[in-house]
Image (tube, helix red, strand yellow):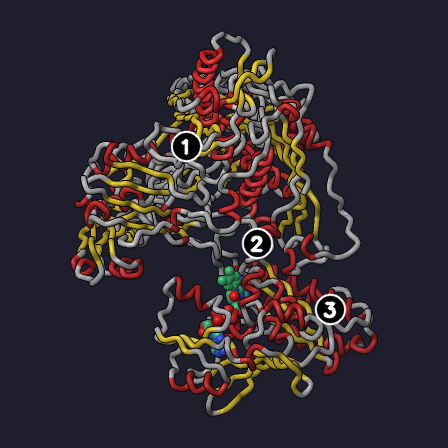
């Protein structure tokens, strides 16, 4: 695998991009992770590993039906089971029985009605997990089963409602039932720009569909809730945003934040699936009721019902273009099925609606993006949301247009590409690098993998060692796609992060402690926090304090925002600490020096050299600062036109996929998946490449195999037996080029990295498969049946 | 739960006879999944990993006797020449970890229509050895599979070995899965040429309630080869022959639609695999490579 992080010396305006200038272990270096060895040796403590001797096990009884009324719940037999300490239902929720990230519409425990298969109904605490599970089986719930609403367009009346015949209740007067008091529409985003009745020489239309992807993190939902003596609780949990969890848990428990303290437990992957609550309130309720610590761990099956998934999408696109290939107009309708509860649906619609035409200039735009309720599993955050789904459509449109006009697919993208200074469909002007043309150029310039091989190596064939072809039916295809993603929280959200940094002398050496509540979910934020402290304070030894709610919010570990936001906060607070140290230094020197900085454990003057060690300056003094840091403000969108300065930063990546398709069997081998991405500043080049590899593989999974298959509101494949994610044998070599065009508005010039590669890899693969097969292929993931037409 | 750990064949057979409901366990790669998912709660587990005889393979009257407890990893490493079809099938099973633990005996015990060893065993005319305290019997593979996840072994019997005559001609195994490892087959096909008796054998997986042979396809092909003198001449296959054979193979299947694939795709892919793999075995045969 070739991975060559590259800088453009001519354009790399970021200070420190010249690697000779890098503080060892600081920004721009690739020091190893503080948790790396523990993870590699299997000693890292994940949230499911926590243990207290007197703890009980919690278990959740879930609805078998996607839509039903609850007539009665009888817990008596379960409660009478030996070893059972508590059985709780919605009656026992101490505070509000509703929670949610954006709308509090989701019950902690279902009352009177269930809206999706797997919705929690009752909780059991017992002294053994198996006793808890079997006791839960003894809870009798009487349901009246209703016909589920399973289609987003049907849910909001854009298509007729034809309920399954066997349903008990088909809704009032044959009308599609309202799943929530305000109906089934969660958000409708309208984007109107330019002429609404524009016409063009060439018209390209397409209907696209994207299936429901799962985050498939390896560490299932788990946590430990420990009651204190005063009616409060400490919750140790794997999550993505401690403070937004705390807010929701407090509301549900009816307790103030002082009495609900959260600490981040070891997170085994997240990808958006831990933004919503899982066992949080449940564990706390059982702990407060029994007075004992409660451990809850979902198994893989339950995990498929225990977190939100990626919104499946139906996308209707019409593009008009000049014969030259220049885009004239876009008319687009998108439906994103949010399932039973809102979760992040409004934000997903926001991204899909504003980013859904890709990194291309289109003067006349009409977009209607709808997010809906249904009785499908709730959908919410997943890496690249809104952009991932729409990229399949906008890149297919570009390929179709190129084919229609007989133009090169790369050329047509470059001809229409956004660049710095361009206006995006929301009217916002891109005010930092947008190197779409160059990303494509670089990919095109990379050598193509050879088609020749002297000897049959099954591992290189579609189907692999399953031995389905020795070359018969195999056709090669190449495809390109570009990712375009807003970084951090948009549309006027007050997006901030808090950092606390302490510098002191311990055992004769200076040591920094950095404390934030920003979740480390595997991406390497803990390393970045250390690197920034090293660079800013010139101190090698940096301890990362456990992540908890005793410091202010770090915001969400999502939207590619943590290196930007918490990195920005740490840098900002390091600056305040440094200022204080330099004041102390000047006091001890007895004079002012204009060019002081901290470097290599010393106070250094550019003109005079090393003046004192940090130990000498600090003595017993402990310098600690805490502050919040914000990115520049954004604004909401105009409700009628969708115009506004809504996004703080844009990320760009592009992929070239080379595939071999067995066109007779419909099997695909990705031969190579090359990526070029602009990251503004490679804070940790190794981690950047890791994000690109992982994101590319996750996007490839969605293109080729990853789908939660749902029929009548029920999940047909809730296990890794049939929910397939790529293995190492499916993962191709990934040549990677990393560009560093500083964003002047961002700390160190950096650009969020994590999501963009997930967005373009799948569409590039789809494009390559289309090139190999000559088929339209409008649905992801593509199944063998779609290629063989059987 | 009782956990029995016999160390000899006799002890194991006695244990099975005394506890007919005991669940045998070899590699545990099916059993442990069933337990974890609470699909079965056996009162007794009968651990067969301590019986040396089950973990061995050897020659027995000209044929290979493969102990039920020999892992896939060993089949691939030690028997690729002598049992090529089975070794190819073994190569497609799960992951290295699963191949280290999983056994052909366990695959037979599970008798899943998607078990990968079955098409290869059918094509190789394997015989399954079943033993109880009352004696030993050998069943042709065709008679072994009786229904979805059911086989002809009795409650007091253990699967102790598989007997396979080393092939007189080439063999192939192919399997459709939507990723390149760790995948349950959508459909699978195995073919073996038996030039010593001018016969063809096949095995179909994941495309019927049980693994089965495509008997009509076998007879038709053997007759066609005979009629054209091809067994002797080893000449090129006539135009359309592979296609007709492929159609007969598909006709022998009765697949269903499920989350892994449609019935139509299963039929289509079977016919493609049949056509291609016939080409491969014939190529080998024609060029004098026996397997
Ligand atoms: C991750 C994973 C991937 C897998 N991938 C594949 C795959 O690709 N292809 C495939 O075919 N299978 C696959 N399997 C299933 C399994 O690995 C195979 O069926 C394997 O052959 C089972 O062998 P074992 O020794 O582990 O059997 P065990 O689990 O020990 O036993 C399997 C069954 O046989 C019975 N049994 C065991 N020994 C005897 C005996 N001597 N007499 C009578 N009954 C007996 C057991 O009671 C049980 O019902 C996979 C399993 C897992 C967990």
Q: Residue A102 at x, y = what percent? A: 33, 31
Q: Which residue is mark 2?
A: B178
The answer to which image quadrant residue A395 occupies is: top right
Q: Where does residue B77 sit, x and y in percent of width and height?
A: 66, 68
Helix, strand or loop under label 2: loop
Position of residue B213 in the picture relative to residue A559 (left or right): right
Please determine whether, in this image, residue A591 is positioned above or below residue A363.
above
Per the model, the C-alpha gap separating discs 3 and 1 is: 60 Å
- Judge: label 3 CB < 8 Å from ligand 1: no
Indicate the chain on which mark 3 is placed: B
- Residue A512, quarter of picture: top left
Do the residues bearing badges 3 and 1 touch, measured as CB atoms within 8 Å? no
Q: To which residue does mark 1 refer? A: A518
Can you give x and y, in whole percent of width and height, for residue B223 in the image? 72, 78
User: Which chain is home to disc 2?
Assistant: B
Task: Kindly identify which residue carries mark 3.
Answer: B281
- Name the residue nearer the viewer: A38 or A92: A38
Of residues A270 and A172, the one nearer the viewer is: A270
Within-10-Å neighbours for mark 3: few <14, some 14–19, many 20+: many
Chain of the residue where label 1 is placed in the rendered structure: A
Q: Say which quadrant the C terminus of chain B sits in.
A: bottom right
| Mark 1 and mark 2 on one chain | no
Q: Calculate the distance from the C-alpha at mark 1 to the C-alpha at mark 2.
A: 38 Å
Task: Indicate the position of residue A208 as horizontal and vertical percent values.
Answer: 52, 38
């Amino acid at each position: 695998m070739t991975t060559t992080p590259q800088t453009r010396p001519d354009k790399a305006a970021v200070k420190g991009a010249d690697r000779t200038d890098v503080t060892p272990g600081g920004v721009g270096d690739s020091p190893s992770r503080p948790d790396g060895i523990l993870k590699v040796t299997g000693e890292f403590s994940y949230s499911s590993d926590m243990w207290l001797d007197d703890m009980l096990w919690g278990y959740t009884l879930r609805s078998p039906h996607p839509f039903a009324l609850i007539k009665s719940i009888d817990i008596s037999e379960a409660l009478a089971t030996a070893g059972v300490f508590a059985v709780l239902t919605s009656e026992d929720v101490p505070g509000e029985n509703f929670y949610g990230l954006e709308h509090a519409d989701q019950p902690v425990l279902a009352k009177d009605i269930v809206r999706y298969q797997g919705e929690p109904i009752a909780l059991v605490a017992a002294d053994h997990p198996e006793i808890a599970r079997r006791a839960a089986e003894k809870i009798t719930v009487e349901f009246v089963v209703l016909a589920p609403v399973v289609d987003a367009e049907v849910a909001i009346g854009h298509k007729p409602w034809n309920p399954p015949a066997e349903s008990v209740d088909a809704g009032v007067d044959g009308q599609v039932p309202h799943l929530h008091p305000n109906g089934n529409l969660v958000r409708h985003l309208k984007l109107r720009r330019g002429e609404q009745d524009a016409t063009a020489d060439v018209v390209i239309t397409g209907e696209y569909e994207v299936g429901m992807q799962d985050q498939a993190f390896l560490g299932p939902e788990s946590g430990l809730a420990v009651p204190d003596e005063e009616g409060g609780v400490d919750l140790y949990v794997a999550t993505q945003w401690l403070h937004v969890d705390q807010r929701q848990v407090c509301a549900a428990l009816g307790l103030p934040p002082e009495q609900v303290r959260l600490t981040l437990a070891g997170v085994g992957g997240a990808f958006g699936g831990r933004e919503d609550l899982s066992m949080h309130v449940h564990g706390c309720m059982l702990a407060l009721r029994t007075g004992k610590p409660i451990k809850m761990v979902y198994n893989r099956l339950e995990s498929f019902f225990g977190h939100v998934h990626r919104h499946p999408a139906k996308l209707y696109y019409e593009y008009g273009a000049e014969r030259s290939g220049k885009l004239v107009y876009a008319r687009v309708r998108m439906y994103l099925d949010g399932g039973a509860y809102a979760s992040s649906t409004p934000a997903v619609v926001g991204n899909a609606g504003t980013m859904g035409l890709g990194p291309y200039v289109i003067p006349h735009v009409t977009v209607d993006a709808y997010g809906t309720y249904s009785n499908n599993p709730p959908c919410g955050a997943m890496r690249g949301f809104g952009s991932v789904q729409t990229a399949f459509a906008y890149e297919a449109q570009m390929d179709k247009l190129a084919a229609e006009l007989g133009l090169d697919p790369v050329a047509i993208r470059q001809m229409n590409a956004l660049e710095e200074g361009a206006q995006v469909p929301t009217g916002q002007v891109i005010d930092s690098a947008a190197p779409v043309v160059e990303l494509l150029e670089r990919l095109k310039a990379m050598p193509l993998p050879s088609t020749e091989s002297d000897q049959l190596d099954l591992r290189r064939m579609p189907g692999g060692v399953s031995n389905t072809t020795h070359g018969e039916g195999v056709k090669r295809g190449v495809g390109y796609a570009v990712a375009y993603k807003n970084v951090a929280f948009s549309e006027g959200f007050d997006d901030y992060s808090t950092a606390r940094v302490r510098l002191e002398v311990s055992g004769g050496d200076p040591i920094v402690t950095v404390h934030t509540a920003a979740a480390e979910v595997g991406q390497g934020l803990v390393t970045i926090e250390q690197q920034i402290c090293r660079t800013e304070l010139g101190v090698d030894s940096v301890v990362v304090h456990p992540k908890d709610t005793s410091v202010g919010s770090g915001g969400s570990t999502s939207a590619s925002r943590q290196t930007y936001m918490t990195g920005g906060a740490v840098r900002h607070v390091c600056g305040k600490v440094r200022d204080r140290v330099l004041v102390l230094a000047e006091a001890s020197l007895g004079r002012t020096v204009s060019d002081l900085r901290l470097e290599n454990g010393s106070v250094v003057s550019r003109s005079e050299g090393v003046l004192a060690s940090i130990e000498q300056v600090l003595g017993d003094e402990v310098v600690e600062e805490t502050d919040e840091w914000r990115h520049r403000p954004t604004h909401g969108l105009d409700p009628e036109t969708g115009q506004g300065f809504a996004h703080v930063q844009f990320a760009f990546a592009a992929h070239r996929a080379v595939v071999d398709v067995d066109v007779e069997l419909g099997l695909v081998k990705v031969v190579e998946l090359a990526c070029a991405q602009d990251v503004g500043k490679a804070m940790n080049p190794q981690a950047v490449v890791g994000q690109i590899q992982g994101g590319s593989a996750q996007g490839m999974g969605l293109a080729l195999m990853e789908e939660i298959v749902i029929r009548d509101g029920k999940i047909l494949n809730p296990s890794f037996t049939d929910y397939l994610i790529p293995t190492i044998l499916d993962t191709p070599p990934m040549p990677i080029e990393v560009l560093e065009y500083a964003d002047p508005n961002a700390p160190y010039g950096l650009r969020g990295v994590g999501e963009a590669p997930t967005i373009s890899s799948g569409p590039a693969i789809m494009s390559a498969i289309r090139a190999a097969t000559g088929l339209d292929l409008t649905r992801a993931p593509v199944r063998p049946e779609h290629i063989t037409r059987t | 739960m009782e956990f029995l750990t016999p160390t000899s064949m006799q002890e194991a057979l006695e244990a099975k006879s005394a506890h007919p409901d005991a669940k045998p366990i070899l590699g545990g790669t099916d059993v442990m999944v069933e337990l974890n998912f609470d699909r079965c709660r056996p009162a007794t587990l009968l651990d067969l990993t301590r019986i040396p005889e089950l973990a061995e393979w050897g020659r027995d009257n000209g044929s290979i006797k493969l102990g039920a407890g020999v892992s896939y990893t060993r089949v691939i490493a030690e028997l690729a020449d002598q049992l090529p079809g089975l070794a190819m099938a073994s190569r497609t099973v799960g992951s290295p970890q699963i191949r280290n633990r999983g056994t052909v005996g366990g695959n037979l015990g599970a008798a899943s229509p998607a078990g990968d060893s079955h098409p290869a065993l059918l094509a190789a005319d394997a015989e399954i050895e079943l033993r109880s305290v009352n004696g030993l019997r050998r069943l042709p593979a065709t008679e072994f599979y009786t229904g979805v996840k059911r086989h002809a072994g009795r409650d007091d019997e253990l699967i102790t070995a598989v007997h396979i005559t080393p092939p007189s001609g080439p063999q192939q195994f192919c399997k459709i899965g939507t990723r390149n490892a760790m995948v349950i087959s959508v459909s699978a096909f195995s073919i073996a040429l038996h030039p010593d008796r001018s016969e063809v054998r096949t095995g179909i997986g994941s495309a019927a309630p049980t693994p089965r042979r495509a008997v009509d396809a076998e007879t038709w092909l053997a007759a066609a080869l005979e009629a054209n003198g091809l067994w002797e001449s080893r000449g090129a296959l006539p135009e359309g022959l592979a296609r007709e054979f492929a159609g007969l193979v598909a006709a022998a299947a009765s697949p269903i639609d499920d989350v892994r694939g449609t019935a139509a795709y299963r039929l289509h892919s079977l016919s493609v695999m049949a056509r291609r793999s016939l080409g491969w075995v014939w190529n080998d045969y024609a060029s004098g490579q026996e397997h």
